[in-house]
Image (spheres, rainbow, N blue to C red):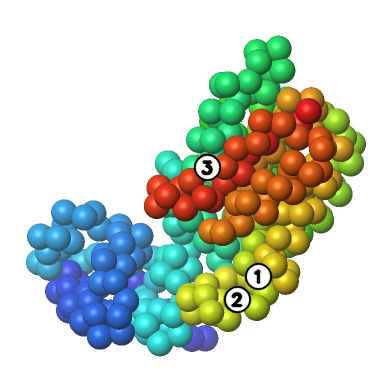
Amino acid sequence: MAEQQPKEISGLQLWQWRQAAIAAAIAADVSPTEVDWLLQEIAGLDRLALRLELFKDWAQIQLQLPLAELDLLWQKRLKERLPVQYIAGVTPWRKFKITVSPAVLIPRPETELLIDIAVAAVAKSKKELGLQQGHWADLGTGSGAIAIGLADALPEATIHAVDYSSTAVAIAQINAQNAKLSDRIKFYQGYWWEPLESFKGQLSGMVSNPPYIPSSTLSFLQPEVVNHEPRLALDGGDDGLDCIRYLVETSPTYLKSGGVWLVEMMAGQADAVQEMLQNQGSYCNIEIYTDLAGIERFALAQRL
């Protein structure tokens, strides 16, 4: 039987590893702050202990995995551009810690704004529509981050989260359990709206961060993205708009009158998405929202 590597090391050993890891990160043009973020997750150290190097004199520190294994993964970060979130197995998102693996897209900070936009749309809508209640869909849920954000922000709603990948659905379920929101989110493996046939005309809202990268530009993305994140969650077809086009066309069948339609998109797609929504004929109150960097990133509409 293989000998189990120890997960306990001295503070001095970890300090030496950290020094080497930071130097290697700088040499490889990777942000050295990633080392400390990783140690917060893997070694349970806080920012102050890391910044002041207080841990250096500690007799022992408990790691989540042996140091040799951590070092191997760090080398992959530098040489193969494996995202640091996949090494830690988690990423912060809104007030949650979301479990991630290469089977799901790493939820981005800008996507957090989808929840705020949805909540603002509900607040602005007529009271009698009751959008804060009823059924909401998160289509292409991935890690489940959007579904969790919606369930947290709309405590009277039931969230229906759908993904084509059964592995993604399994991870999303773990995240819902960790967030203590399992009772409010229902998960389905399937293609977009298909598992929700029985909810036609009943949805208070649909939120999605669909694949929106044009196929031809995928290879130009950062290696962290193109080499490690699931292509299924990135590839939006020739013009990047295949999935959004599908959601524009199919959602009116599922949304109730006044229901919210909200998606994330790529820089430069806003005009095309706005035009699609207008031409479809079933939407009103179409608005484009920017992210914190000022990029037109979100399209919101309501079902007529």
- What kind of element bears circle 3? strand
Write the residue at 46% across / 59% down: 90
Report which residue position mark 3 lands on: 289
Left or right: residue 18 versus residue 214 is left
Report which residue position mark 1 lands on: 214
Report which residue position mark 2 lands on: 218
Q: Which of marks 3 and 2 is nearer the N terminus?
A: 2
Residue 27 picture quarter: bottom left
Residue 286 visible, this orientation: yes
Foreground: 4 or 73? 73
Left or right: residue 17 versus residue 99 is left
Q: Residues within 10 Å of mark 1 (few under 14, many from 20)?
A: some
Is label 2 in contact with label 1 (beta carbons under 8 Å)? yes
**Residue 157 image position (x, y, % from top left):** 66, 27
**Residue 260 image position (x, y, % from top left):** 69, 33
Foreground: 200 or 186? 200
Q: Which amino acid does label 2 sit on?
A: Leu
Write the residue at 53% across / 58% down: 267
Write the residue at 32% across / 76% down: 30
Q: Which amino acid does label 3 sit on?
A: Tyr
**Residue 209 image position (x, y, % from top left):** 62, 52
Q: Compute the Cα span from label 3 to label 2.
A: 24 Å
Write the residue at 21% across / 55% down: 47
Q: Is residue 233 above or below residue 78?
A: above
Residue 181 visible, this orientation: no
Q: Quadrant of the C terminus?
A: top right
